[in-house]
Amino acid sequence: MNLKQLRCVREIVRHGFNATQAAEALHTTQPAVSAQIRQLEEELGIRIFERNGKRLTGLTEPGERVLTLARRILEGVEDIRRVGEDFRAEDQGTLIIATTHTQARYALPRVIRGFRHAYPKVRLRIRQGAPVELCRMVLAGEADFAIATEAIPDTPGLTMLPCYRWNRCLVAPHGHPVLATQPITLETLAAHPLITYDFAFAGRSVVERAFAKAGLQPEVVLTALDSDVIKHYVALGLGVGILAKMAYDPEQDRELAARDLAHLFPDSTTHLGYRKGRYLRGYMVDFIRRFAPHLEEIIG
């Protein structure tokens, strides 16, 4: 058994059981990957993958256990490598952040600007997606940090750090009658077509629970993956929007006016998550410190 075989198992699963794509990721050939898998299966005396002819279709029950242990071993090897890198070239490396559009667009720019200035030799990459997908990326080793409001606290295998709390605002075109309502209530909102986040994003469940608790069923005419799309369709007159307060800028969003909704919905907390037991290089710890200064005592 060797690390090359374990990497083949991991990459095949990462690429949807496509051995050709796994081979490309490993910079080798498909026959070489298949040979590594055959050798490992023969040594262990089990089948790791289900097959339909020559095509791999899934993991067997023992294959699931092999994958779990292979990931753990490879993560440990990678952490050992990071220790060496940290002492050999502490200001060089890669940082991959998986996050949502709202975080990337509104919460991270200031932090990233300062981080890039402090660590010009660190290759910084940002990947966007739904919160559940972001967590999967981190657990699979495809990203270092996941930053989101949903999913991170509920994902086993992640260390969860609470970064900041936020709430929501109502946005509508200037002159819209909802803006003149005093006070704005859930009943007020439910009387208008609503545009808000997709089910997986930015505390949508918090909004739904508040309406359900009040016995209301608002008409949600459009859901979107990011705040800019919500604001665009609000400006077109399709409905009024509920979005993260940080996503409204009176200078940039001049077509729209906003009203605070913190009295209607509980605060949500944005978290940063990374794989439990993961060795964090110095610049990774510094990124966390810059994003959430109050975590200084926790992360050292």
Image (cartoon, rainbow, N blue to C red):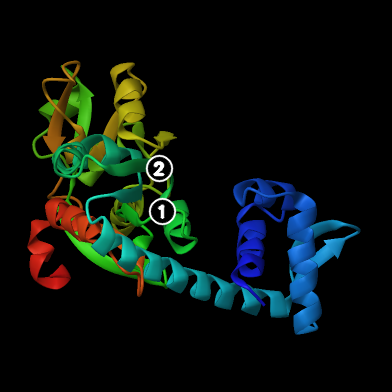
Q: Say which of 79 and 173 sits in front.
A: 79
- Residue 266 in view: no
Q: Residue drawn 61% across and 52% down? A: 26
Q: Residue drawn 28% across and 65% down? A: 280
For the C terminus, give its image quadrant: bottom left
Q: Where is residue 164 in the image (x, y as percent from the top left)?
A: 16, 55
Q: Where is residue 88 in the image (x, y as percent from the top left)?
A: 27, 60
Q: Residue drawn 65% across and 74% down? A: 64
**C-alpha separation, residue under disc 1 versus residue under disc 2:** 8 Å
How crowded is the residue under tag 1: few (<14 C-alpha within 10 Å), some, or many (20+)?
many
Q: Say which of 209 and 80 sits in front.
A: 80
Q: Residue 127 carries which label?
A: 2
Q: In this view, does 164 lie to the left or right of 96?
A: left
Q: What residue type is labelled 2?
A: Arg
Q: What residue type is labelled 1?
A: Ala
Residues under numbered marks 1 and 2 in contact, where contact means CB atoms less than 8 Å apart: yes
Quadrant location of residue 196? top left
Which residue occupies the extreme right position in the image? 53
Residue position for label 1? 143
Q: Position of residue 62 (x, y in %)?
A: 71, 80
Q: Say which of 19 and 292 sits in front.
A: 19
Quadrant location of residue 251? top left
